[in-house]
């Protein structure tokens, strides 16, 4: 499990808004490692260079929030996330949101977990 910086910003409800953000990041040679966007337009991203990404997005007038999140690499199979979630719950932390993915042919999946205090949760849970 690693602590990484997640970037959050609101997208307008218009065609191409997400494509524009992704194009901006690609132009800056920033790789998106994980992302989710909800119905309200909140885009959350974990990228390989959050400082460069946040700067580029702010230069294009996006309000970018930064937050520490837990990024868990797990075996890609039934029940593999359960033990990690139990460690976090047993340490008294509530998971506010989660997103992730794994390719069917790849043995590892990545899951992003948003908790109130990612650093303390990682330390207390021993992960």
Image (cartoon, grey):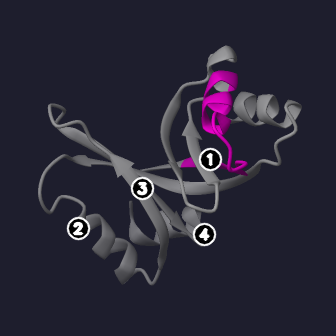
Marks 3/4: CA distance? Answer: 17 Å
Q: What stretch is highlighted in magenta?
A: 4-24
Q: Depth check: give the residue in front, 124 or 32.
A: 32
Density class for disc 1 (Cα within 10 Å; few <14, some 14-19, many ≥20) is many
Marker count (numbered):
4
Considering only order in the chain, which callout, 3 or 1, is on the residue closer to the N terminus?
1
Residue 55 in percent (x, y) is at 81, 32
Q: Name the residue under label 3.
A: 99
- Mark 2 lies on residue: 83
Q: Which residue lies furthest to the left in this view?
A: 78
Q: Distance between the residues labelled 3 and 2?
A: 17 Å
Residue lying at 61% horizontally and 30% vertically, measured from the top left: 19
Q: How crowded is mark 4: few (under 14 residues within 10 Å), some or many (20 or more)?
A: some
Q: Earlier in the sequence, mark 2 or mark 4?
A: 2
Residue 98 placement, left or right of 25: left
Q: Where is mark 1, residue-wise?
A: 5
In this figure, which residue is indicated by the disc labeled 4? 117
Regarding mark 4 in the picture, which secondary structure is present there?
Answer: loop
Q: Is mark 3 on a helix, strand or loop?
A: strand
Position above or below: 84 against 15: below
Q: Which residue is drawn at 61% across and 50% down?
A: 43
- Mark before the other along the chain sequence, 1 or 4: 1
Comes first in the chain, label 3 or label 2: 2
Q: Nearer the viewer, residue 15 or 60?
A: 15
Residue at position x 82%, y 42% in the image: 62
Say the numbered circle drawn on residue 29: none
The answer to whether 20 is drawn above or below residue 96 in the figure is: above
Mark 1 and mark 2: Cα distance apart in space: 23 Å
Viewer-nearest of discs 3 and 4: 3
Q: Which of marks 3 and 2 is in front?
A: 3
CA gap between label 2 and label 4 equals 19 Å
- The verdict on residue 14 being magenta is yes
């Amino acid at each position: 499990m690693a602590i990484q910086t997640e970037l959050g910003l609101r997208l307008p409800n218009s065609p191409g808004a997400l494509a524009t953000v992704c194009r901006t990041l690609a132009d800056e040679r920033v790789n998106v490692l994980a992302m989710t966007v909800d119905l309200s337009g909140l885009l959350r991203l974990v990228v390989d260079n959050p400082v460069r990404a946040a700067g580029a997005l702010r230069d294009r007038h996006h309000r970018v929030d930064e937050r520490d999140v837990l990024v868990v690499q797990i075996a890609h199979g039934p029940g593999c996330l359960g033990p990690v979630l139990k460690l976090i719950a047993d340490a008294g932390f509530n998971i506010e949101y989660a997103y992730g993915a794994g390719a069917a042919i790849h043995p590892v999946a990545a899951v992003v977990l948003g908790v109130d205090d990612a650093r303390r949760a990682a330390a207390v849970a021993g992960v």
